Image (cartoon, grey):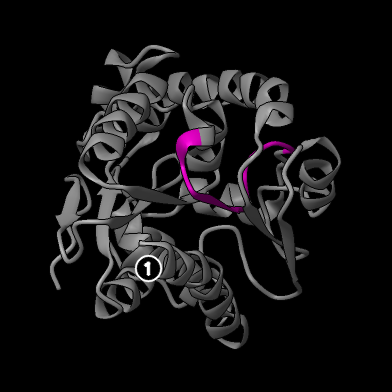
Amino acid sequence: MEIKKNEDLHIRKSNKDVVVFIHGIFASPLQYKDLIEKIVELDYSVYAISLYPQSPNPKEYLKLNKESWTKQVNMTLNLLLKKYEYVYIVSHSLGGLLSIEYKNINQVKKLVLWAPALKPKITFKSIQIGLINLDKPHEDDYLEFCRTKGSVSPKGLVDRVYLIKPTLHLLYNVMTAKKKLKDIQIPTLVIVSKNDELVRFSTGKLVEEKIDCCDFRLLELEKSFHNAFSDEEKELAHSQIIEFIKKDVEQNEIIS
């Protein structure tokens, strides 16, 4: 299956159910590759959003304003709600914030928030990721994962300066999403890890306290990172996400 870093992916397997993937800042649909393949094998349709500017050129990020990502996600989800009977969201980091901010979020069937960036932090590992050389492979498996799955390719100091503006937009989304958490009423699964280098582990409890839904689940991991599940926990996380979505799909089939 070919998944491109800077293009939306739409695979239509079902006319009824679609799983929408929304990645984090400077990431891409590629980070979901393994999970997307499993979802497709189960005959669900898939739509993976490639967040603007859909370009590896850091200078293109200067064209964005603080509402660009929100408008993109709102427009895409609105179209999918018209095409499909049931829409499920799997989101990561910034993608989680954009999902929470979606104006029609309670029309979505279920929501997965993987490391939603509601309580960001800075660590040595996160600085390493921000400064990695994208032209050559890395011995560190996690740095190499971030290098190959990212959507943008900064090659020097000037390129990294261009990325300050969208990072500030992320902080705007943090504030907006925190205010809208209380409005979410749909079933929600939150995944957080103690080893996350960019989002605080207590984010899971924050969502649990603020959200107002009848079906809330919290998966707390020990070894996974911000942008990838550890080898030991990847299958656990994927199985939990699929079970969370599949249970509702099966109920929909019985009703129809």
User: Which residue reaches farthest bottom?
Assistant: 232
Residue 123 x/y as whole percent: 71, 49
Q: Residue at x 72, y 61 (%)?
A: 217
User: Which residue reaches farthest front?
Assistant: 255
204 is higher (above) or lower (below) than 107: below
Taking depth in this image into account, of 30 and 141 the one nearest to the observer is 30
Rendered image quadrant of residue 63: top left
Is residue 13 shown in magenta?
A: no
Can you identify the residue that label 1 sits on? Answer: 253
Rendered image quadrant of residue 31: bottom left
Residue 45 x/y as whole percent: 24, 61
Name the quarter where the N terminus is drawn. Answer: bottom left
Residue 198 x/y as whole percent: 66, 48
179 is higher (above) or lower (below) than 206: above
Q: Residue at x 31, y 29 (%)?
A: 78
57 is higher (above) or lower (below) than 132: above
The answer to whether residue 129 is visible is: yes
Taking depth in this image into account, of 39 and 178 the one nearest to the observer is 39
The crowd level at tag 1 (other Cα within 10 Å; few <14, some 14-19, many 20+) is few
Name the quarter where the C terminus is drawn. Answer: bottom left
Is residue 116 shown in magenta?
A: yes
The answer to whether residue 134 is visible is: no
Identify which amino acid the numbered label 1 is placed on: Glu
Q: Is residue 43 left or right of residue 221?
A: left
Q: Is residue 120 left or right of residue 245?
A: right
In this rendering, the count of numbered labels is 1
Classify mark 1: helix, strand or loop.
helix
Rendered image quadrant of residue 176: top right
Q: Residue at x 26, y 46 (%)?
A: 84
Query: What range is drawn magenta here?
Result: 107-119
Residue 158 x/y as whole percent: 35, 26
Q: Is residue 207 left or right of residue 45?
A: right
